[in-house]
Image (tube, rainbow, N blue to C red):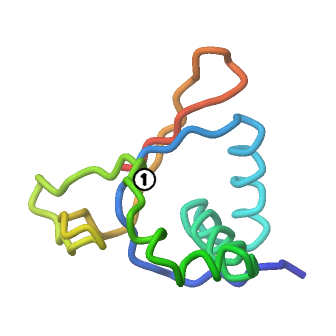
Amino acid sequence: MPLIEVTQSRYVSATIRLAAATATLIDQYATFVHASADDVVDRALNYVFGKDREFQEYLKTTQSRDVVPTLRVRRSGNGEASEPSATGRKVVAGVEVRDVLPGKSGSEGIIRAR
């Protein structure tokens, strides 16, 4: 039985780097639960965020509001629907398609959502 339940969600388009082995596991888990890799990553992260009591306490502090965004979110520019982010910037909403590009060392890759 899967540890996370995956439902369709709205996404922003972002670029992240992760180990190639992790990308493979994401694809395998997505196949296992009959969902997209994007949904698996989203639900897994939300599961961890919700279970981490120390992080939940941190979110209640003013310090959590002063975080400098480091996630590379792609801006809307192609007529797609957009929605404001927490920082007031507009971001693309919709289903993502991803490319896996080889990293410098070959042991990691870049997943770029389009």
Which residue: 68% across, 82% down?
50
Asked if residue 53 lies left or right of residue 96, the reply is right
Asked if residue 49 lies left or right of residue 82, the reply is right
Question: Which structural element holds mark 1?
Answer: loop
Asked if residue 72 lies left or right of residue 85, the reply is right
Question: Quadrant location of the N terminus?
Answer: bottom right
Depicted 34 relative to depicted 6: above or below: above
For mark 1, what is the residue? 97
Q: Residue furthest right?
A: 1
Rendered image quadrant of residue 94: bottom left
User: Residue 112, position in %: x, y?
Assistant: 44, 42
Which of 87/95 is in front? 87
Depicted 9 relative to depicted 110: above or below: below
Which residue: 53% across, 84% down?
60
User: Residue 38, position in %: x, y?
Assistant: 54, 62
**Residue type at tag 1:** Val
Which residue: 48% across, 70% down?
64
- Disc 1 packing (10 Å; few <14; some 14–19; many ≥20): few
User: Residue 8, position in %: x, y?
Assistant: 50, 81
Asked if residue 95 lies left or right of residue 85, the reply is right
Q: Residue furthest front?
A: 62
